[in-house]
């Protein structure tokens, strides 16, 4: 396992270096840059920017430097000083912009994932044990519906129902009176009152998919020879089910741990935009639209780093949970 972990760390370094190059190249591929976008927006609004102001802006942000120089300035500042650069559009440090949204994104992502686990695993186990029963058919039906309905559509429906029939605004995470207020018990309770809607919206598709995966994995295990052997030895059915097949079928539980880390920053972008959630997704979308290359590049690098780290942690957790995977690692 130590040799495997060492190889994975080497792959992580190489992968992140390649991602940083590809990311910076891609965000510079569209024609123009932040200043040209700013000039176009100003002209469309009837405002004028003099050539001297344009030249000063380009010199200020180093946009006339070669791409390699811009890349080295960006990546070296991150590695040596932890400086992700300055956002052009927001005129703030990128780390400050992202940090303001991390806490709410983390609460939303963790809550959604816990809801998925709490609902999907019991239903998936029941569907597998009671295969082709009415309960299995019902769970499968709602599972397919949950996977088929787009999240943004469900968000719009819940927002309409909440406003039309309950007179409550379910957009955002706070009521207007708590939007800019300091944190107190009232603001926390207001957050909890708004939080359930995006949790349900984000969690529906994940729950439906996890139910299908858990059911399929458990069905594969229930007909293994070791199950028939344990049953023939007189092991109680409930103990047999929980000790062996269920344990082997819970691999999705550990494989999804890696999803949690990038979700803490990015979250569900489309749902966040539709519901006006102050998470990282809308900020990333705004940076892309404004060609704010330091903001976008830093966002993509952070998400990529968290994804790679989360994948390694998921692999190690799976190896700890499933002895078959440990044996495979030893062979490698």
Image (cartoon, rainbow, N blue to C red):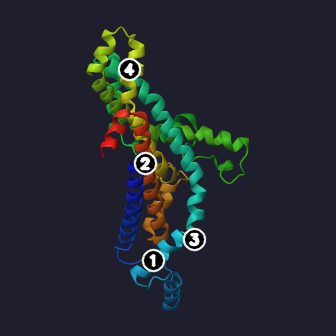
Q: Which mark is residue 2?
A: 2
- The answer to whether the residues at label 4 and label 1 have Cβ atoms under 8 Å apart is no
Q: What element carries label 2?
A: helix
Label 1 or label 3, whichever comes before in sequence order: 1
Percent position (x, y) of residue 310?
Answer: 45, 49
Mark nearest the camera among 2 and 4 is: 2
Q: Residue 81 carries which label?
A: 3
- Cα separation, mark 2 vs mark 3, equals 30 Å
Percent position (x, y) of residue 164?
Answer: 52, 38
Residue at the spot x=38%, y=22% of the render? Answer: 244
Picture layout, residue 243 above or below residue 307: above
Residue at the spot x=49%, y=67% of the render? Answer: 295
- Cα separation, mark 2 vs mark 1, equals 33 Å
- Cα separation, mark 1 vs mark 3, equals 13 Å
- The answer to whether the residues at label 3 and label 4 have Cβ atoms under 8 Å apart is no
Label 2 or label 1, whichever comes before in sequence order: 2
Which is more toward the observer, 263 or 35? 263
Q: Quadrant of residue 240?
A: top left
Q: Residue 233 carries which label?
A: none
Q: Residue 72 carries which label?
A: 1
């Amino acid at each position: 396992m130590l040799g495997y972990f060492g190889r994975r760390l080497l792959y992580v370094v190489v992968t992140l270096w390649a991602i940083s190059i590809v990311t910076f190249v891609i965000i510079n591929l569209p024609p123009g840059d932040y200043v040209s976008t700013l000039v176009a927006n100003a002209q469309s609004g009837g405002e004028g920017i003099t050539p001297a102001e344009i030249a000063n802006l380009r010199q200020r942000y180093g946009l006339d430097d070669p791409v390699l120089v811009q890349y080295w300035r960006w990546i070296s500042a991150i590695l040596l000083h932890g400086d992700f650069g300055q956002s052009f559009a927001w005129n703030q440090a990128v780390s400050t912009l992202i940090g303001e949204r991390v806490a709410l994104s983390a609460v939303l992502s963790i809550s959604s994932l816990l809801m998925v686990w709490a609902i999907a695993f019991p239903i998936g186990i029941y569907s597998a044990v009671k295969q082709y029963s009415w309960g299995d058919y019902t769970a499968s039906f709602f599972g397919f519906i949950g996977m088929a309905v787009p999240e943004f559509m469900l968000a719009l429906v819940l927002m309409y129902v909440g406003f039309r029939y309950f007179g409550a605004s379910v957009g955002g995470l706070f009521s207007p009176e708590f939007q800019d207020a300091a944190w107190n018990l009232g603001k926390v309770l207001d957050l909890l009152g708004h939080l359930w809607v995006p949790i349900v919206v984000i969690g529906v598709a994940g729950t439906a998919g996890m139910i299908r995966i858990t059911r399929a994995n458990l069905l594969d295990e229930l007909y293994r020879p070791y199950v028939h052997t344990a049953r023939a030895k007189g092991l109680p059915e409930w103990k047999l089910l929980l000790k062996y097949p269920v344990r082997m079928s819970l691999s999705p539980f550990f494989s999804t741990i890696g999803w949690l880390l990038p979700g803490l920053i990015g979250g569900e972008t489309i749902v966040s935009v539709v519901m006006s959630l102050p998470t990282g997704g809308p900020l990333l979308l705004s940076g892309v639209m404004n060609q704010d290359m330091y903001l976008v590049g830093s966002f993509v690098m952070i998400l990529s780093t968290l994804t790679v780290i989360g994948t390694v942690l998921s692999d190690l957790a799976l190896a700890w949970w499933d002895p078959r995977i440990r044996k495979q690692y030893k062979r490698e």
